[in-house]
Amino acid sequence: MIITAAWLTEREACRDQVEPFEAEWPGGAELNETNIRRALELHLDLDWLARKVLRGQARREYGGALDLALAEYKRATAPAWAEYERVIAPALAEYQRVIATAWAEYKRAIAPAQAECKRAVAQALISALALEEVENVD
């Protein structure tokens, strides 16, 4: 199978994927091990490609291998993720405190204008009703 920039575009590949593909393979590329390894080096989205080209048993086997790879990735990255969360926890708590304080101050600041606007809306409705041009709500 030959993959071309036009083939990718027809299948709505992202432009940031099509451009490096086309720069590397202006005439298209055969779907083979060598080109897949080069696509990996170019950081092209091989999972997107697999989902477009694989069918039947090949797709099921790919899905199984992908599930295993993702499980291993999660296992391997769990300690780094836990450390990241531990390190950012104080900053996140402070951020949330600052946001809550700012939101409360904003609500207090707009309360008078909000109340005046609601009074003006009510008065406009009362004035409009006086014209007696309303739909019957029986």
Image (cartoon, helix red, strand yellow):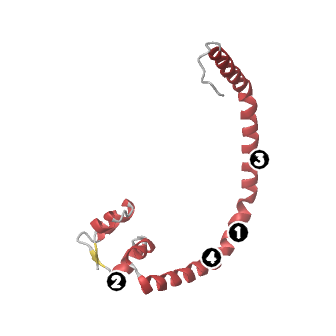
Q: Looking at the image, do the residues carrying marks 1 and 2 touch, with CB atoms under 8 Å apart?
A: no
Residue indicated by mark 4:
74
Q: Which residue is mark 3?
A: 97
The residue tagged with tag 3: helix, strand or loop?
helix
The mark nearer the N terminus, 4 or 1, is 4
Q: Give the left or right position of residue 100, taking residue 29 as reference.
A: right
Say how many tags the image has. Answer: 4
For the residues carrying marks 1 and 3, which lies nearer the camera in this image? 3
Kindly identify the residue that appears in the image at 53 percent across and 84 percent down. Answer: 64
Mark 2 lies on residue: 34
Identified at 74% across, 59% down, the residue is: 89
Tag shown at residue 118: none
Do tag 1 and tag 3 residues touch (Cβ < 8 Å)? no
Q: Quarter-wise, where is residue 99 in the image?
A: top right
Disc 4 is placed on an element classified as helix
Q: Amino acid at mark 1?
A: Glu
Badge 1 is on which residue? Answer: 83
Structural crowding at the residue carrying mark 3, measured as other residues with C-alpha within 10 Å and reported as few (<14), some (14–19) or many (≥20): few
* Label 1 to label 3: alpha-carbon separation: 22 Å
* Labels 1 and 2: the sequence-earlier one: 2
Q: Nearer the viewer, residue 134 or 20?
A: 134
Q: CA separation, marks 4 and 1? A: 14 Å
The x and y percentages for residue 92 are: 72, 54
